[in-house]
Structure formats: structure tokens, C-alpha cells
Image: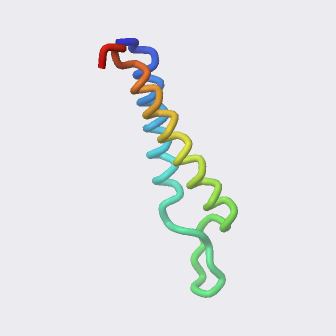
């Protein structure tokens, strides 16, 4: 098991979780006065979350032994 790739993958998953926590409220809306992030930033945040999760899983799978 290559620990460097494993911890790098866990780091990406933690980063995705933290970005999710910051992005959780939803986009801002003039209709109800919600002061969240603007819609483009909200969509960009979800794109970054998805990419971090995919890269994190890929690094964790890469750290597994080749015999699996």
C-alpha cells in the first residue's frame, strides 16, 4: 500500500467536504433575500466538489495493492 497516495486521496475528500460545508446554503436569491453565494459561484463550487471526490477516490484506489 502506497501511503502517500492514500493520504493525498483522503486530503482531497476532506477538501471536498469542507467546500460542501461552505457551499451548503444554496445560491443567493433576490426573491427571498437569501444572501448566499452567487449562482455561478454555487455551480462552480459543486464542480470543484465533484472533481475533488473523483480525484480523491482515484488516489485511494491507486494506493491499493495491484493484486486486488
Q: Residue at x 51, y 54 (%)?
A: 22
The answer to whether 30 appears left or right of 3 in the picture is right
Extreme front residue here?
67
Q: Residue at x 47, y 33 (%)?
A: 56
From what the image shows, is residue 57 above or below residue 50? above
For the C terminus, the image quarter is top left
Extreme bottom residue here?
31
Q: Residue at x 59, y 47 (%)?
A: 48
- Where residue 60 appears, x then y in whole percent? 40, 26
From what the image shows, is residue 31 above or below residue 67? below
From what the image shows, is residue 31 above or below residue 6? below
**How many marks can you see?**
0
For the N terminus, the image quarter is top left
Q: Residue at x 60, y 53 (%)?
A: 45
- Where residue 38 appears, x then y in whole percent? 67, 67
Camera-side residue: 18 or 58? 58
- Where residue 28 appears, x then y in whole percent? 62, 73
Tell me how the rendering is colored: rainbow
Amino acid at each position: 500500500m502506497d501511503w502517500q497516495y492514500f493520504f493525498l486521496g483522503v486530503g482531497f475528500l476532506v477538501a471536498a467536504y469542507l467546500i460542501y460545508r461552505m457551499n451548503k446554503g444554496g445560491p443567493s436569491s433576490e426573491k427571498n433575500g437569501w444572501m448566499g453565494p452567487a449562482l455561478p459561484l454555487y455551480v462552480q463550487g459543486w464542480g470543484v466538489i465533484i472533481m475533488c471526490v473523483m480525484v480523491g477516490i482515484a488516489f485511494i484506489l491507486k494506493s491499493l495493492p495491484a493484486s486486488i
